[in-house]
Amino acid sequence: MGELTFREQRRLRITRLADEFGLGTWPDEKADDWFAQYLTRYEAAWQTYHDVTPALAAEPRHLRLGVITNGDADQQRRKLQHVGLTGLLQQATISSEAGAAKPDARIFWMACSGLQLQPSQVVYVGDRLQTDAEAAIAAGLHGIWLDRRDTTSVTSVPRIRTLTELAPLLGPA
């Protein structure tokens, strides 16, 4: 009791936002329509960083490429398809299907299992230091932090600022 569905949460956020901006009280139907229009624009704007596709396409074919993502499986799969990555990936491990989300070690282990690799055989690159790189290391993988913002954070975790810097860290084939 007292819990809202995802749709009810979304409606509540939208109607509160409309009220805060002085747009009046919105009925559920108006909130749903606004969200549908927002979602269409949001999905149309999905894109990768400029270095993603070239870096993945340049990787030797003997590497098994996968992705771990927190979120709704349907949306994440549509996103991967929209940006053209599905053909480059052997595995997509998505939290809503996995029953665990980063930084939980179980999601990393599930991804390794899906690739038929032991965690010690896997390099995981992620853009969040704690949730991705450090969590991967804690799960037994080799974690690399993709620090696109070039922060001044001090860490012992290997760090790259662009995916073009990844190949030298992986070593020879």
Image: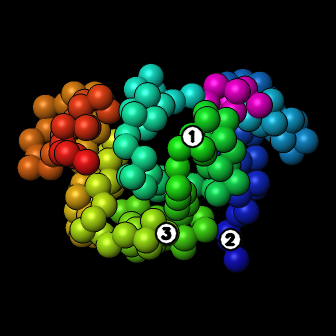
Q: Which residue is mark 1?
A: 85
Amino acid, disc 2:
Gly
Residue 84 visible in the displayed image: yes
Residue at (76%, 46%) from the top-left corner?
Answer: 11
Secondary element under disc 2, as helix, strand or loop, is: loop
Magenta stretch encompasses residue 42: yes
Q: Which residue is mark 2?
A: 2
Q: Earlier in the sequence, mark 1 or mark 2?
A: 2
Q: Which residue is mark 3?
A: 114
Magenta stretch encompasses residue 173: no
Give the CA separation, mark 1 to mark 2.
40 Å
Residue at (32%, 33%) from the top-left corner?
Answer: 163
Q: Which residues are magenta?
A: 40-46
Residue reaching furthest to the bottom: 1
Circles 2 and 3 in contact, beta carbons < 8 Å: no
Q: Earlier in the sequence, mark 2 or mark 3?
A: 2
- Magenta: predominant secondary structure element? helix
Amino acid, disc 3:
Gly
Residue 17 x %, y %: 67, 34
Amino acid, disc 1:
Leu
Numbered tag placed on residue 107 in the rendering: none
Residue 96 x %, y %: 60, 65
Circles 1 and 3 in contact, beta carbons < 8 Å: no
